[in-house]
Image: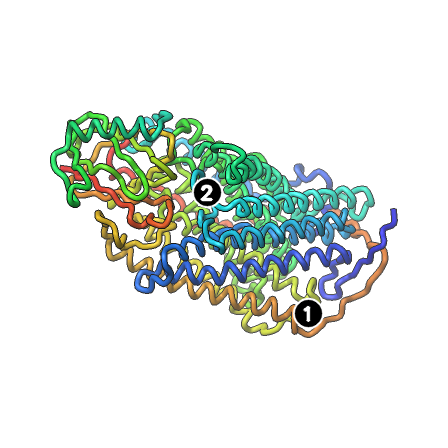
Amino acid sequence: MTAISPPSDRLWWKHPLDRVEGIWITIAFVWCMVMFFMMIYWHMYGNQNLSTETYKTTPEMFTAKAQAMVDQYTVRTEVDGAYPVVAPPAGADVYMIARLWNFWPILQLEKDQTYRLHLTSMDYNHGFSLQPANINIQIVPGYEHVVTVTPNQSGTYSVVCNEYCGIGHHTMVGRIYVK
Amino acid sequence: MSIATTYRTCPRSGLQFESQAEKLMLANAVAAVVFLLIGGILAIGVVLTRWPSIHWLEADTFYQVLTAHGIDMLIFWIIFFEVAVLYFCASTLLRCRIATPKIAWTAFALMVIGGVMNNIAVYQGGSSVMMTSYVPMMAAPSFYLGLILFAVGALIACFVFLGTLVVAKAEKTYQGLVPLVTFGAITATIIAVFTIVSGAIILVPTYLLSIGVIDAVDPLVYRTIWWAFGHSSQQINVATHISIWYAVAAIVFGARPMSERVSRGAFLLYIVFLQLASAHHLLADPGMSTEWKVVNTSYFMYFAVLASMIHGLTVPGAMEVAQRQKGYNKGLFEWLRKAPWGNPSFSGVFISIIGFGFLGGISGVMMGTEQLNMIIHNTIYVPGHFHATVVIGTTLSFMALTYFLIPVLFKREMIAPTLAKWQPYLFGLSMYGFCLVMMGAGTLGVSRRHWDMAFQGSALAYEWPGAAYMMMGLVGVFGIAAITGGAIYIYVTVGSLLWGKKLDIGTVSDRPTPVPPTAPAAAVQTYGSSGLVAPGSFVLALIFLAAFILYYFINWKYLSQLWGLS
């Protein structure tokens, strides 16, 4: 009776198990429970939990809101005027458009202040990959995802697109300054 | 009921092959190897482009090659081989004729047509959408149609497998229960039916979108349902390659399962919980609630992970018990030291078990943890993980099984046995390195599916740390070593089939010899009370657990240093 021949005893669920198996199953089960409750624990006590606040949107609606923010809070421009650098006040709603193949505009945030970051795509799926912090969020067209972020270090951060979006994918990089 | 067919008893293994089933297994296995060859050639383009100092292909060619590599390997190579394994588990292990051979051939034809059609669509350009083909990025209609035809063929093959089980039961070709390996194959088939139906639900509307019949497919709905297909198809692989582990343990060592209850119970957990894993791919998405993510990503409290951890003990445990009964009883690990390390069927499976557990399993749980996913999502850590599961786990197991099948099913003497002896080491261990450096680069944030980590042409280019460049260079080195190992496998397999010495086919009869009933095994009565029959495997399992726990909390520590997110 090997694993490739039929066992004669039909009641397989009554076969005895060895102590090695019994002990291992118990340990593995406990570990599985630890991992499961760790996720819940982090939602209660941890500081890095991804928001699920989501709204349906359209490119027009979202662009209008992003444009209003740019009109109000632009402090300078970069790359020959192509990218406004926007410095909204702490606690504000800030918008970042992902589209073929850039993130627009550049944001300037303050350290240890909290912002409501709105993300969507104008066209295909894109990826929000904040480097070098390494925070990765999917951007799906038609859905406005509101993520509450609190930068904890000042510096220059890049936003790399890490969802394949066509031939210019590798040029799609945005920027966030933290003062 | 008499059906005109013959049954051949292999003189080398004692296995009995029905002639139609044998031809079908051979055809499916050969088709699988052809797609492995294509996928392997494409892999050269992928690794030599991601190796930063070589950066070989142009962007458009790279994305085209990457799309075809993913689909040929993850879908066509693996599923063709799986169909051969299913027919083996039903027809050969139960000594039964295959149900409806004509329909089985139709399934094979559909799969070949679908596979070729999809490949042509990709090579024509305009369908470089990656395996996931997320809408609204669209491929040519024949891209989707090829996948749909292939899936229909695979679904039919699943039903041929189930039909064969029914025939075996009705014609009483065996007594008692189906063997554990067949039980595992049934698990794989049940998951496959769910998987293929999910694929149809989302690919059919996408095909209709591509030919202009409907206006839109929601991108988030697409992702949710596509991953019920995309992830579950990897669970078919898990169920199949674990069945192969048990099969090779039985073939090489004469091992029996330590306990049918434990091993079959673990397969049942797969059936119940594995399908929830679609959620793994949506943890960084908008839309789904936190509760939905937590419950689904953990397969409802990690019960499928529990099942894998059980198999991870019981497969080596079964080998250990068999070896100890042969007298290799000294210390914890004599059974392992005295194992047939020169037999590629064994070494392949053992390298597969260790790599699948330590690299594929642990990394998979990291990515599948709701919060930890944020430091991994869409980085090159992800292909690092799934090359450990699908290449080290599934592909290497299939290779190990092939070495057993060359004399038994192909009836040929293996050419170049010395090359074959080293192949699992070269292929398996270089894949270990390959997966580790990809995970390392991913931990630093390097993106997957990305042509140029230098971002040439971008106004706001980011500069990766030097370590990331070094690790991507090593991805290239290990990748080329692994591709060489894959080439040796194809050379040995195809070479043996074409010009290996023909072996005695054994006796042929026009009726099956039923599987002789086995006496209730002595082991069943002695197991259980004796206690700790496999201490070496238990120690290996504890080492695994220690690595798992340590790495798990290192990742939480890393996460806790990031920006606050809520």
Between residue B524 and residue B414, name the one nearer to us: B414
Determine if marks 1 and 2 fall on one subunit: yes
* Residue bearing mark 1: B412
Q: Find residue B307 and report its horizontal and vertical position in percent.
A: 54, 41
Q: Quadrant of residue B501?
A: bottom right
> B8 or B343: nearer the eye?
B8
Where residue A120 sits: x, y (%)?
33, 33
Q: Which mark is residue B327?
A: none
**Residue B453 vertical placement versus B304 (above, below):** below
Q: Residue B490: percent from the left, percent from the top?
A: 56, 66
What amino acid does circle 2 point to?
Met
Name the spot of residue B311 as percent of width and height, x first.
55, 46
Query: What amino acid type is highlighted by mark number 1?
Result: Arg
Determine whether the residue tagged by mark 2 lies in a helix, strand or loop.
Answer: loop
Q: Which mark is residue B138?
A: 2
- Residue at image position (21%, 27%) is A68
Marks 1, 2: nearer the viewer: 2
For disc 2, the chain is B
Measured in 3D between alpha carbons, the distance from the residue under mark 1 to the one under mark 2, in whole angstroms, is 46 Å
Q: Callout 2: few (<14), some (14-19), or many (20+) C-alpha neighbours within 10 Å?
A: some
